[in-house]
Amino acid sequence: MNAELRPIKTAAETALSAAFAAQKAQLPGMASAREAAFKRFEAAGLPHRRVEDWKYTDLRALMREAKPLAPRPDAVALARAKNAGAAFAAVEGRRIVLVDGVFIPELSDLAALEPGLSIRSMALAAGDPAIAERLGHVVATDNVAVALNTAFMADGVVIDVAERAALTRPLHLVAFNSGGAPASVFTRSLATIGKGARAMLIESHEGAPGNDYQVNTALELTVGDEAHVDHVKITGEGAGALHVSSLMVAVGAHARFNEFLFTAGAAVVRNQLFVRFDGEGTVAGIRGATLLNGREHADTTLVADHVAGDCVAREVFKSVLDGESRGVFQGKIIVRPHAQKTDSKMAAHALLLSEEAEADSKPELEIFADDVQCGHGSTAGALDDDLLFYLKARGIPAKEAEALMIQAFVGEAIDGIEHAGLRDTLIDHVAAWLKKRS
């Protein structure tokens, strides 16, 4: 007689199972999709170091408990969120505000929407068959974090930009965590940019400093043929936060797609990107900058899947690591058999400012075509002593010389952002981080 082997559940996994059983009837729509996703999570459990994609970010160990689902924000939470995203005022974007995972129209800028632009709540749209048909199908993945998000997703936004529409203002999705009590937030958003349209979408995530909360957020983005789309995500959560983000992007033919990740905050961050090139002749730039201190941990995991040929993609990620922080980059370029003439290059560079900081890098290529130009590279090291001496020899104090070199290192990635106001704002964020460090 063979005994049935059952994996031992952690306290967090047990709490998530209890929360789903108690809350699933109250969650908006998509009941069958939720059930299927949660079964996927229950079968796999929280990802751990024996799962290759999570080797450097053992979520089972890092997430020792699951916080209760965040309640609907009250008047106090809304008052705290009134000035959320104010640091990006120079961008002059159209604010779309989520507080504790709930879309708040009264704090959002929804007046006089440009022709062809539609913005609505995911919770209210969940019963729409057209939404159900798209949700979870932009880029299919069996990722456990995405499955957990699908099971618990409560609200988010649905953004539609019609064909040939050109938005004059960036859309600024502000996700604010009020920090009233330890809680977990699950948001899911869906954005569809039509053929030939032009749009910029900025996500900023922020929360009360020092509070212990958990965020699992996901965005599905469809970029139509000949469209031009910029997506920028800024993670500046509170110091005690655990933040897991998933971006699933399907890019059409002859499009331009630019992605930028900026991370400077939270105890643990996992940014995972699944980008699929469905059409020929597309040009993409995927970049990122990460600033870590103390015992912060940030993981950027990218899968760039070239299904169609003749696409050009450049991926560049810069990390600055101080204290006992740990930066992780995992990047995979996949070139399918019919994706001939693909030109894709990926680089990850880490700057270590202390003996205790750690950088882990794992670039990969999977190429099934024979007429391609693909490559990857990775570096990790300290500040250049010769350059530092050169600056100090010209009368620049040591700390200021270090700051100039760090700004130049990170600025190479930030300079790829087309919007001047946002570019300047992020440079200011780097300067503020450096000032706090000194």
Image: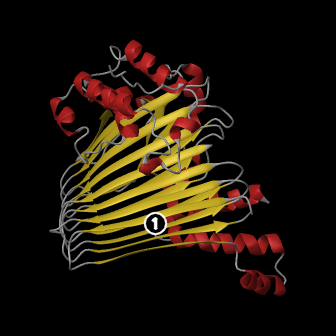
Q: Which residue is mark 1?
A: 417
x and y percentages locating residue 327 in the rendered image: 58, 57
Look at the numbered disc 1 and give the secondary structure of its residue: loop
Residue 320 quadrant: bottom right
Left or right, residue 160 beside residue 20? left
Point out the image quarter for the N terminus.
top left
x and y percentages locating residue 393 in the rendered image: 83, 87
x and y percentages locating residue 205 in the rendered image: 52, 43
Residue shown at 32%/32% (left/top)? Answer: 40
In the rendered structure, which amino acid carries the disc numbered 1? Ile
Left or right, residue 15 beside residue 339? right
Nearest to the observer: residue 393 or residue 199: 393
Residue 97 quadrant: top left
Q: Answer whether residue 109 is visible to the viewer in this image.
A: no
Q: Is residue 114 above or below residue 18?
A: below
Residue shown at 64%/68% (left/top)? Answer: 351
Residue shown at 74%/63% (left/top)? Answer: 354
x and y percentages locating residue 406 in the rendered image: 67, 70
Task: Looking at this view, name the residue that lies furthest to the front.
Answer: 1
Nearest to the observer: residue 407 or residue 35: 35
Residue shown at 50%/45% (left/top)? Answer: 49
Q: Is residue 280 above or below residue 18?
A: below
Q: Answer whether residue 50 is visible to the viewer in this image.
A: yes
